[in-house]
Amino acid sequence: MELLSPEGLRQDGRRPRELRNLQSAVDTLGNADGSATFELGNTKVMAAVFGPRAAQGKSSGGRRDADIRCEFAIAAFSQSERKQLSKRDRRILEVRSMLKEALKANVLAELMPGTTIDVYVQVLAADGSIGAASLNAAFLAVADAGIPVKDLMAACVVGLVQDTPILDLNQMEEQMSRGPSLMMAMHVGLKKIVVFQADGRMPVEGVETLAELAEGGCQAVGKAMRSVLLDNTRKLALARGPVRL
Amino acid sequence: MLPEIESATSRNDRVFIVKALAEEQRIDGRKPFDARLRKIQIAEDNSGVTVQLGDTKVMAVITADLEEPRADGGRQREGSIRFKVDVGPTVSFAADTTRLSEDEQLITRLLQKAIRNTGVVDLEALCVSAGRKVWALAVYVTVLDHAGALVDACFLATMAALMAHRRPDATVDASTSDITVHSPDVREPVPLSLHHTPLAVTFALFKEGDDLVMDPLLKEEAAAGGQVTVVVNTAGQVCAVQQLGGLGLSLEQVMRVVRIAAGQVEDAAAQIRAALDTHSTAQLAARVRRQQGHAAHAAKAKAAAFLDVALPPLSTLASVAFEADAAGPSAAAQHQEDTEMRMAPPPGVPAEQPTVVNASPAGSTQLQDVSDSAARATPDASFDAIAARIAGTQLTSAGEGKAVKQKSRARNRKSDAW
Amino acid sequence: MTSKGQRRYAAQGIALGCRADGRAGKDYRPLQLELAVVPQANGSARCLIGASEVLVAVKVEVNVPEEDFPDQGVVHFSVECSPCASAAFQGRGALDLGADMAGNLRRSVLGGSASMGGSLDLKALCIISGSRCWHVHVDGLVINADGSLLDALSIATRAALTDLQIPRVDISPSDDPEDEPEIELDDDPEHAASLDASRIPVVVTLAEAEGRPAVDLTADEEASCPGPRVHVAVNGRGCICGLHKQGNAPLQLEALQEMLALAQQLGPRLCKAVNAQCTAQLHGRRQHA
Amino acid sequence: MQSVPFHAAERPLELLSNGTRLDGRSLEEFRRGIFLSTRSVSQASGSSYVEFDNTKVIVAIYGPREGGHSEGLYEQGRLQCDVSFAAFASRQRKQTGDRAKMSKQNAYEKELASQLCTALTPAVQLASFPKSVVDVCCVVLESGGSDLAVATCAAALALADAGIEMLDLVAACSVSRVGDQLLLDPTTDEAHREGGNLMLAMMPTANLVTSIMLAGEHTSAQATEGYRLSSYLLQPLA
């Protein structure tokens, strides 16, 4: 099956450089200190942050910074075919360590010595770009928890299909295209790349094309996330009563 | 960056590394874009490869089994390849089991992405009988010593092992459709058909990502702000890029790293090829000799091979040979040794791994660390013994100019094995 | 909540019939139910009881029946407690809880060990006796934990099974009688069948403080009530379909009787409310279509 | 005593003839071959071996021992239960190759373990061994019906044998509903055809329920009758 029609449209009718419908919300769960959901088309991810709280576990005592721990799970019903993945599954572990690395790079952990921050991410519906969506949800939850971070971090996935770079791959495109893909997360204000995971065979220039598209994608996602966070802050400010300057 | 490694490296060490780098100096005397000495040893029966990258040592063994193909769509005519990376807890001083298992998983994933998913191995060529039997390759990568740039060494070992691998020939009888696997004695084993050669190049990044070093030592990894591993093939195509450690990089910085990496793999690939060439020549020579000699002669050679360990003259000669090689050390090499002595504390890691490695899962491979250059330099030694040794294993070492390190290693080895 | 005083306050509230959020002993928190929330499932529902939130998705697949029951379908239950739901669910902590709740759901829906006398007609899930039947996977996911999880899960399960649409299968016998007949799935939602879920019970969890039973405990109340908790599965007709005691304290037979009576009184009301919600939403969807 | 056949023998079609069960019991009668003994495992702090005809269970108690730090600190003591089936315990040998079946078996064993824990804990004076753990290891040698009930009785005996302070012994029994009739202490064949079941564990002296579990649709009269039956009949068992 052709992923791009002769008119240059994708299977779901998008143009190559078009994001899917993006929806996100913060403060969605009652128990967590920070929580968020992030939807990208049919992909839906929810994240919760507990902490910073007094160090948990043996190894984290006496640290000079906060210990960031991550857990990642995919609901059994989230894919079109029912599949229960164990916590030790390689795909789970891969995303988990990516989340952890990326958050470590973003959170100003040295400001919270001797604490633990738990970030839990749960995929509710999986339709491609799970890693990026998870990272976005996790970041929103971290921001919602009021944890100091370097900058707004946004992630997206891009790929190359029939020599055309496309933005925000869905499940079908991820599976069908054997072409290269790139998952990238960046600090949108500082323009610094935090996660760069490319795979597939491509010339060096291909990497550059993909990276440039991904940069644009991250900026767009970041913009949406910023507005959600700002809205939430406004709401909180209103709930507090009139602001006196 | 990683607390476990941090604790194994002092703060002073880290500061020093960063400062020295500002003057383009590294603690082992290399320039920022120099790779360490690579050594590639190929087992006699082609089943495995041991690779050394500086002190990082990795072994890769490939097994091939006939299996039924995967049932899901379109895979009926394809063999399979899977990877198992094993980073034992004994490997590094900073051993922390969770961290190591994360390493294992990261490397496995990268091997899958860059070797399996980019179609290095022609899987369709592994099909014996569509829908019934295909070859299933399993690549076992065992890390013997971790002294930095583990991913690079793993890729080097895996690719060398894939290139050296020979699987027994199998044919399907047209009338009965029985599958016959031919013994290597009857039919020449078949090499894998490989489409391209991806190799990994790891960089450690310092200072906002502007300073970088290739092929970092473990200490440099600990001192660095982040790492980028680029997997590139010899045609300059990027197969995977992985950023680690979370140092924020600009797009230009990432692209710079990728470009530098693309220029570096040819060298490593050439070394694999050289190793393979020497290996196959030696193998051929050994076979010719085996066929020329009578049965009695072969038995004698075999006996000599068994006595191998107890042959003092050769070991002395070997080290003499190394010293002869090192007789005219270049100024750079001299400098290298000086720096090493001044800056590097005595190695805290346990002495080198024993050189006779008997670790193939099949339990059959014996790798013996015998330099063929050493063998060449010993015209007086018993012909039989040398023949047996050449037949036994091969070692090629490229980059002869840097013989200083080799010399000291040879001395170590003398006490270990001979 | 950790302090002793707070715990005692909550326990006394239950004993006096006046709880921290103003409810009496046998009041439920507001219940919200939403059907067909997971597009990739054959049936799904989300249930909120107060702040507790669960999601149940049902998926069906064609598979072989169990050896002992060749002409029945198979229903599997699993419950995952997402660590997002509560800080206590971190790591492997929630695995046992999830398995416990899944077992409880299974017992209350399917009945005894032989899956007979349960509330589902498993024979309706048979496609070809002895070789093909539907396997129904009921997967629960706890999204936010604030007490009464099993209650919420059972309600969502009932709703999700009501929502369940099983595709029609066309069986075309192959030419060779030795071969398995071919089975084709009909994707058209018009032709899909639903399952009779009207007899599925809901679970009412009761606790007692000083002899007074109470339902729908919040997480704080659960932590404060030292007494035993009893999960009673009750169907629409008020019959008890399952019973399970939890907690380290023993239970008087009389107290149990009283709890059962309360459960039998509340259960049918709960079922009715669930039914009303389901019908309204299913109806709304049909009109929309 | 005849033993359960290991090949998949046909299940009997009729369970009752003239009001008597296949093994000659009346509806409300326990199995006759009841055998209880203690001190069956020499290394354990306490142990027991219990037979109810074909249901054979061995329980060993270890501890109290220091509670592991990994599980956090508890002021009171804890019981940790483990139930496992011997490979030859059931009609079908335990599957070792099939992963799906193994995980199913594991899940079942885990479930039984947690139920055993619920049934025993109320009777044990946890305060008498603070911050410590008592391990209850239960092996079902032969599964001949009412396994959990028999295991509970055996575990209570073993706890007493180990000298763990308890309020009372715990006795347990199962009742199966087959058709409209309630069968006490069902065998595997009877349980196979049940429409519902009830497992009740109590401390007989104090008449306190430690665990109750019911599955299948019951009218309240049936349920009441069920636990009246079981509670009444449990008295002599203890």
Image (spheres, rainbow, N blue to C red):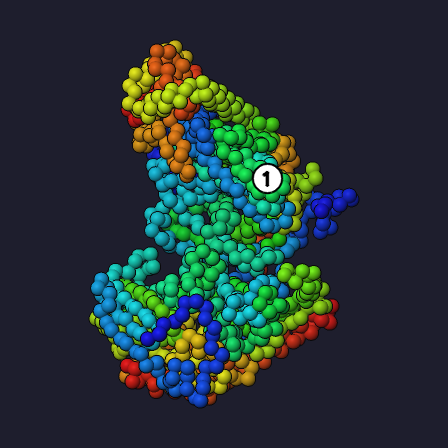
Q: Position of residue B54 (x, y in %)?
A: 41, 26
Q: Quadrant of residue A229?
A: bottom right
In the figure, B101 relative to C32: above or below?
Answer: above
Quadrant (top left/top right/bottom left/bottom right) for the N terminus of chain C: bottom left
Where in the figure is residue C202, as x and y percent of width and height?
Answer: 52, 76
The structure residue drawn at horizontal position 49% and vertical position 62%, both measured from the top left corner, is C80
Residue C182, horizontal then vertical, whole percent: 67, 61
Q: Residues within 10 Å of mark 1 (few under 14, many from 20)?
A: few
Secondary structure at badge 1 equals strand
- Give the side of residue A44 with respect to residue B351, left or right: right
Is residue A169 at all visible to an observer of this figure?
Answer: no
Going by the picture, which residue comes out furthest to the right? A7
Return the residue nearer the eye: D205 or B249. Answer: D205
Relative to D3, is C269 above or below? below
Q: From the viewer's side, name the closer residue of B307 and B301.
A: B301
Which residue shows up at 34% across the image and 17% down it? B318
Residue kind at label 1, given as amino acid type? Val
Q: On what subunit does the disc labeled 1 rest? A: B
Left or right: B320 with respect to C86? left
Quadrant of residue B177 in the image?
Answer: top right
- Quadrant into which the C terminus of chain C falls: bottom right
Task: Give C20 or A86, whichever is nearer the viewer.
Answer: A86
Can the viewer see residue B9? yes
Q: In front here: A44 or B191? A: B191
Residue wearing tag 1: B172
Q: Residue at x 30, y 68 (%)?
A: D58
Q: How many marks?
A: 1
